[in-house]
Amino acid sequence: MALISDKTVGRLSLYRRILQEVLGGTKEYLFSHELAQYAGVTAAQVRRDIMAIGYAGSPSRGYNIRELLASLDQFIDPAEKQYAVLVGVGNLGRAILSYFAQRRLKIAIQAAFDNDPAKVNRVINNCRCYHLSSLQQIVRENQITVGIISVPPEAAREVADEMVKAGIKGILNFAHVRLRLPRDVWVENIDMATALEKVSYFARQNLG
Amino acid sequence: MALISDKTVGRLSLYRRILQEVLGGTKEYLFSHELAQYAGVTAAQVRRDIMAIGYAGSPSRGYNIRELLASLDQFIDPAEKQYAVLVGVGNLGRAILSYFAQRRLKIAIQAAFDNDPAKVNRVINNCRCYHLSSLQQIVRENQITVGIISVPPEAAREVADEMVKAGIKGILNFAHVRLRLPRDVWVENIDMATALEKVSYFARQNLG
DNA sequence: TAGATTGTTAATCGATTAACAATC
DNA sequence: TAGATTGTTAATCGATTAACAATC
């Protein structure tokens, strides 16, 4: 299986969600143009993406929904349950905890961290909150590979460096800062302030 | 001023944040490679982006921080205060309200909507919550151009269509669905579930 | 001036789309 | 078979990077 790009993985995740919805219905097979319609992409794109994960459809019937879904599960989900830590238990951090706690994903947030003594040792959304100083130890002991950053921008770089030192290989960064990290650490930025500014800007352009 | 791409606007927003931080210090001028360093992009990229908004630096001193910041403000911010509505006052919706209420952006959330009677007419984070049925009226009366969607995926398409009918031109979509809307409506997706799946996937790739 | 940086064009890169023989 | 769809390669598109004359 060749290298799969960032964007392809994103679309595969979306296809999976769509197929999960469709599975409830009576359809057993789906053509690329149908999935493309749901996903808002071209049929050629769908075919290339599905080819990339090594699943093959039939020219006469299209893709078997159940089989394709199984292939996507196998590709996206880890073999064993994977764990993440979250640093920064403010409003946003708590919302993230509740968001992921509600969903049944194959990756779960196992511990949260903050340096506010009022939060340490409390349990928030089924997740225990520790002092930031124990990040290294807990990450190492549990071989955690994913970190979520929801601290103010000033603190984000330092937290990211700590995470990397502890052995984390993927970071979901909600802070409005672009982190500069070693190549073997994947960073996914979710920047709400920038996103709103972009929407606001292009909405104004579309007014004319 | 030529067309500015999606990604360029995103970087401009980031540069602004960096310059705001730097402004506190003693520096008066900044070279492209310095800003590039902070932003995690190349110097050529910074020069092209700044050129795009029509600001010019000096080969000997670089960019005047205060002036560049003023250019960025003018480019990114609306001339008059701009307003948005939010639909879906669940955990995520409340977190979004508090997130934007805390920041002093030139765009503010003026009204929230939900169809849960328990939430209607309450004030959450300084924002009044209305029943979804009054969305059209309030958007039109206040000439609101930006909408934020934080409802479950099943409801997102319908809410988006309502927003478009009411005249909204830009949508910030937090639902795990790709919306298909007219070309003159800008959609920015913030998909936390997909983002976490991507981080998890690439973290595993980086383990080897 | 000499040297570094700027604005801006040309070259490169990667991702998307179009096209089409192979397949059911 | 005839017709539509598939897997897959070639063409296109757009964004990023490299390069360099103009500038301070």
Image: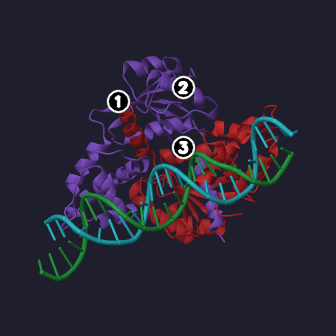
Chain colours: A red, B purple, C green, D cyan
Residue B12 percent coordinates (x, y)? 35, 51
Q: Is residue B9 above or below residue C3?
A: above
Q: CA distance from mark 2 to mark 3?
A: 26 Å
Q: Give SS at disc 3.
A: helix
Q: Find residue C8 and report its horizontal and vertical position in percent.
A: 28, 58
Q: Is residue B199 left or right of residue A15?
A: left
Q: Is residue B67 above or below residue D23?
A: above
**Mark 1 element type:** loop
Q: Return the chain for callout 3.
A: A
Asked whether the residues under marks 2 and 1 belong to the same chain, the reply is: no
| B196, B6: nearer the viewer | B6
Mark nearest the camera among 2 and 1 is 1
In the picture, measured across the screen, residue B60 lies left or right of residue B141, that is: left
Q: Which residue is mark 3?
A: A95
- Asked whether the residues under marks 3 and 1 belong to the same chain, the reply is yes
Amino acid type at circle 3 is Ala
Mark 1 lies on residue:
A208
Considering the numbered disc 2 on the image, is that residue within a helix, a strand or a loop?
helix
**Which amino acid, by three-letter code, is at mark 2?**
Asp
Assess whether mark 1 and mark 2 are in contact (beta carbons under 8 angstroms): no
Q: How many marks?
A: 3
Q: State which chain disc 2 sits on.
A: B
Viewer-nearest of discs 2 and 3: 2
The answer to which of B187 and A135 lies nearer the viewer is B187
Residue B99 visible here: yes
Q: Is residue A53 left or right of residue B119?
A: right
In which quadrant of the rendered view does residue B153 lie?
top right
Q: Residue at x 48, y 55 (%)?
A: A117
- The residue that mark 2 highlights is B161
